[in-house]
Image (tube, helix red, strand yellow):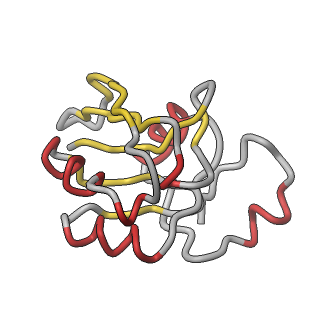
Amino acid sequence: MKIAVPTKGNNRIDDHFGHCEFYSIYNISVKNEVLEKQPLQSPQGCGCKSNIAYDLAEMGVSVMLAGGIGDGAISKLASQNIEVIRNCKGDIDEIVKEYLSGNIQDGGSSCAAHANSGADEHVCNH
């Protein structure tokens, strides 16, 4: 399995999928362990209007752990059989670890826990 995470700066999930600096691609073993992490350059412009969904599918990505993401991008990713888990926040390595442990589910279009948290490291664990 491969997981993609829109990334910015110092290992943080970018709050805007289509404008991230790059994507971090995690190669996951059958034992749910991270085997490898590699960067993938982000295309310029809006995520739903780029070929990123096709590029990720070509690489074998099946899950996108995202912060903010629009319906157009979700549709494009879904058309390539990539499941989107929304409203993730914080350190990308920690988010992937929590996802692999079964502690992260899709936050839907809005996540009240983020508004109330104020904690920089908040992970959406519904």
**Placement of the C terminus among the 4 image quadrants:** bottom right
Residue 45, relative to residue 81: is it above or below?
A: above
Q: Quadrant of residue 88?
A: bottom right
Residue 89, relative to residue 47: is it above or below?
A: above
Q: Looking at the image, which is closer to me, 115 or 55? A: 55
Q: Is residue 116 left or right of residue 40?
A: right
Q: Is residue 43 left or right of residue 97?
A: left
* Residue displayed at 38% across by 65% down: 48
Instruction: Estimate the x, y position of residue 65 in percent, counting from the top left.
Output: 45, 52
* Residue displayed at 40% across by 40% down: 42
* Residue displayed at 75% across by 65% down: 113
**Placement of the N terminus among the 4 image quadrants:** top left
Q: Quadrant of residue 23?
A: top left
Counting labels gives: 0
Instruction: Estimate the x, y position of residue 77 in percent, counting from the top left.
Output: 29, 64
* Residue displayed at 21% across by 33% down: 29
Residue 66, relative to residue 7: is it above or below?
A: below
Q: Looking at the image, which is closer to me, 14 or 31? A: 14
Q: Quadrant of residue 78?
A: bottom left
> Which residue reaches farthest front?
44
Q: Looking at the image, which is closer to me, 63 or 73? A: 73
Instruction: Estimate the x, y position of residue 35 in percent, counting from the top left.
Output: 26, 23
